[in-house]
Image: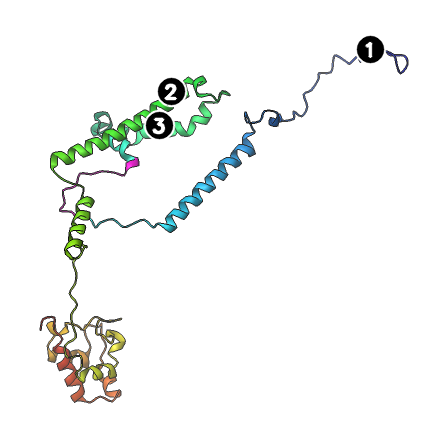
Amino acid sequence: MAHGEKSQEKVVFVGDSRVREGKGFITPPDYTAYPGKSEAFIPNFLLKEWMVGVVVLVGFLVLTISEPAPLGFPANPSASVIPMPDWYFLFLYQYLKYPYASGNWVVLGTAGIPTAAFGGLLLAPFLDRGKERRFYRRPIASSLMLLSLAAVVYLTNFAWTHYQHELKLAGDKPEHIKREEKAIENRQKGLPTSNAIQQKEIAIVDKDDPAMETYKTATCISCHAADLKGASGPSLRGVGDKHDKEAILTIIKEGYNNKMPKMYDNAIAAGLSDQDIDHLADWLAKQKAEQ
């Protein structure tokens, strides 16, 4: 033991060798000494990933709100269509054309290999746990990644090229292109640009007839609307093509097929006479599509 405060004699502490030294609490390493080289996964790295994910999600939400997805053309069963998926499924579409992924091997092609591929991608952080981050120092993981990217690019390009070749052999064009060209041609000619069948509107016959006021007084407008196009009830435009005057009178007095109640009593209570109701039925019988 040293003698005096300024003594240069070395102090040696002798411990009991029978007591093992414990490690105790290990302080996590401070990665700030290695800027840009490494950091703690939780919470530093994970928080950054979440922030990027939130930004991307908000971007998608803004796009979906500002630019709603357009509706495609109606399906045309009679059209000659060469099936074609969306571009991000082209590589799987082409892969399923091969013999070892279709036919007797369809289960392997549709479930087995894709599940193994995407499952391996999900398990990659747990299978490759090396500390090396440079890709050329991780030959297995890097080779698998490059091989997968090359396969996706090749299959996608081959699927699209084969689709164009099939169209050329058939002398055909994709359905949406043909419809767009037809719409442009019709627009130039001043014709309708839609393939939908345009229903010709049926006009009201003798709209200035006094029976129109009788129609309103009898409260027919509550079900059939003032323009006869129908509200809660059916349209009366063209009703003369279905029923004659006698049939319409019967419907007013007795109702129709449990769908329309008797309206005769209501019309009388509204101040109409039998002559007014008879004239109303005669006017409704004139409401025909072709005049």
Magenta stretch, residue numbers:
76-88
Q: Which amino acid is tagged 2?
A: Ser
Asked if residue 180 is positioned above or below residue 18 in the image, the reply reads below
Left of 196 or right of it: where is 23? right
What amino acid is at disc 3? Ala
Numbered disc 2: secondary structure: helix
User: Does the magenta stretch mainly form a helix, a strand or a loop?
Assistant: loop
Q: At 42% across and 44% down in the image, what residue appears?
A: 59
Residue at 55% across, 33% down: 44
Q: Which residue is mark 1?
A: 10
Disc 3/disc 1 C-alpha distance (Å): 66 Å
Q: Residues within 10 Å of mark 2 (few under 14, many from 20)?
A: few
* Mark 3 element type: helix
Pair 3/2: label in front: 2
- Earlier along the polypeptide chain: callout 1 or callout 2? 1
Residue under label 2, please give it. 143
